[in-house]
């Protein structure tokens, strides 16, 4: 009998350790996910454009296809890569983060450049017109998953860099997998709600019993185009802000302290002028200056990508397709 009691005590102790471990994994996953908030906002803001122009019944299936591709990117490709990186090349995390930050800066600057030069979109529009709906959907989903891969790589690297030292291999894998699931669910759940917002508004107008419900639905329908434009602006701002801050922080980690020290000094001086809102002012000035640096880097990368990297990539793609 005493042996059975001892066995039950051992089982209870193991259960407590397991519960504590699960709780710790959940806590670390949520905490690490919050560090990637800027890239997550960018991901959520970028995706709705890929369902633009399709019929209402195809919107959610397209979002679901992209979400499955995003999970594949994170769990099958990036998670093992992150674990290998953590185990064998932790020194490479900061440079890779900076590389991803540079990509975000480029993407943000390119969006602004396209707004200033709308003629750049004509070739894309002509190509889209020549495709049938099935081809266009396949092309859009493929493009969305490709963009998601870059953003997911940045998100996973940010999460990895935010984990405390000494975390075991299994715990690290569990935290990364859980964080990937949380972020994917949050991003594509939000995207699904966004793309169906106008349909919800139309349903409220058509079926609402109260005048208030119908009026609210009408305002939702009228407001969605403006909301989508606002989302693009927020996503673009998040790109250059997050990209710039990652590069500034990465330079500091690599021993180049001047940019971060200059930004810190300006932010502290600005915060001192408004003591009642010092914390917010310091954050805002830091984010603004990070964004300015990100924008400068992004615009500097546009000619490099357009005239050097893109032609080389296109040449390799042609060689692979002909092989």
Image (cartoon, rainbow, N blue to C red):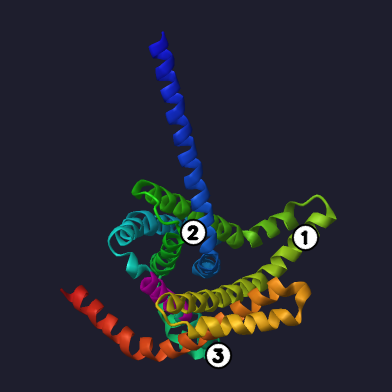
- Residue at the (70%, 79%) spot, across then down: 271
Decide: few, some or many residues near mark 2? Use Cα within 10 Å; few <14, some 14-19, many ≥20: many
- Residue at the (69%, 76%) spot, across then down: 281
Res 200 quadrant in image: bottom right
Q: Secondary structure at mark 3?
A: helix
Q: Spatial distance from mark 1 to mark 3, Cα to Cα? A: 34 Å
**Can residue 134 be seen by looking at this rendering?**
no
Percent of width and height locating residue 42:
53, 69
Residue 269: give its label.
none
Residue, far left: 323
Q: Disc 2, disc 3: CB below 8 Å?
A: no
Q: Is residue 94 left or right of residue 263?
A: left
Main SS of the magenta part reads helix
Determine which residue is flagged by label 2.
63
- Residue at the (54%, 82%) spot, across then down: 261
Q: Secondary structure at mark 2?
A: helix
Q: Spatial distance from mark 1 to mark 2, Cα to Cα? A: 26 Å
First in sequence: mark 1 or mark 2? Answer: 2
Whether residue 169 appears in magenta in the rendering, the answer is no
Determine which residue is flagged by label 1.
216
First in sequence: mark 2 or mark 3? Answer: 2
- Quadrant location of the C terminus in the rendered image: bottom left
Foreground: 93 or 317? 93
Q: Spatial distance from mark 2 to mark 3, Cα to Cα? A: 29 Å
Determine which residue is flagged by label 3.
116
Residue, far top: 1
Question: Where does the magenta region start and end?
Answer: 94-105
Percent of width and height locating residue 80:
31, 56
């Amino acid at each position: 009998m005493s042996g059975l009691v001892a066995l039950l005590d051992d089982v209870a102790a193991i259960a407590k350790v397991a519960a504590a471990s699960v709780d710790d994994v959940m806590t670390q996953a949520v905490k690490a996910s919050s560090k990637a908030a800027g890239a997550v906002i960018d991901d959520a803001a970028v995706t709705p454009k890929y369902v633009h122009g399709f019929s209402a019944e195809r919107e959610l299936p397209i979002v679901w296809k992209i979400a499955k591709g995003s999970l594949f990117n994170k769990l099958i490709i990036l998670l093992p890569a992150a674990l290998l990186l953590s185990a064998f090349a932790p020194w490479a995390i900061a440079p890779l983060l900076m590389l991803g930050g540079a990509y975000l800066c480029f993407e943000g600057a390119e969006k602004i450049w396209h707004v200033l030069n709308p003629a750049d979109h004509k070739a894309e529009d002509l190509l889209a017109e020549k495709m049938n709906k099935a081809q266009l959907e396949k092309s859009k989903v493929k493009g969305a998953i490709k963009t998601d891969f870059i953003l997911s790589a940045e998100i996973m690297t940010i999460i990895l860099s935010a984990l405390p030292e000494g975390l075991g291999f299994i715990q690290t894998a569990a935290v990364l997998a859980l964080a990937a699931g949380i972020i994917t669910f949050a991003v594509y759940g939000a995207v699904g709600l966004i793309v169906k917002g106008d349909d919800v508004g139309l349903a409220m107008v058509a079926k609402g019993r109260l005048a208030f419900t119908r009026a609210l639905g009408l305002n939702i329908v009228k407001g969605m185009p403006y909301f989508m434009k606002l989302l693009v602006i927020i996503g673009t701002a998040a790109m250059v802000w997050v990209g710039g801050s990652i590069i500034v922080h990465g330079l500091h980690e690599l021993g180049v302290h001047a940019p971060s020290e200059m930004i810190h000094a300006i932010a502290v001086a600005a915060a001192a002028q408004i003591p009642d809102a010092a914390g917010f002012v310091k954050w805002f000035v830091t984010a603004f200056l990070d964004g300015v640096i990100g924008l400068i880097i992004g615009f500097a990368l546009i000619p490099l990508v357009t005239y050097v990297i893109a032609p080389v990539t296109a040449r390799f793609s042609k060689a692979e397709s002909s092989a």
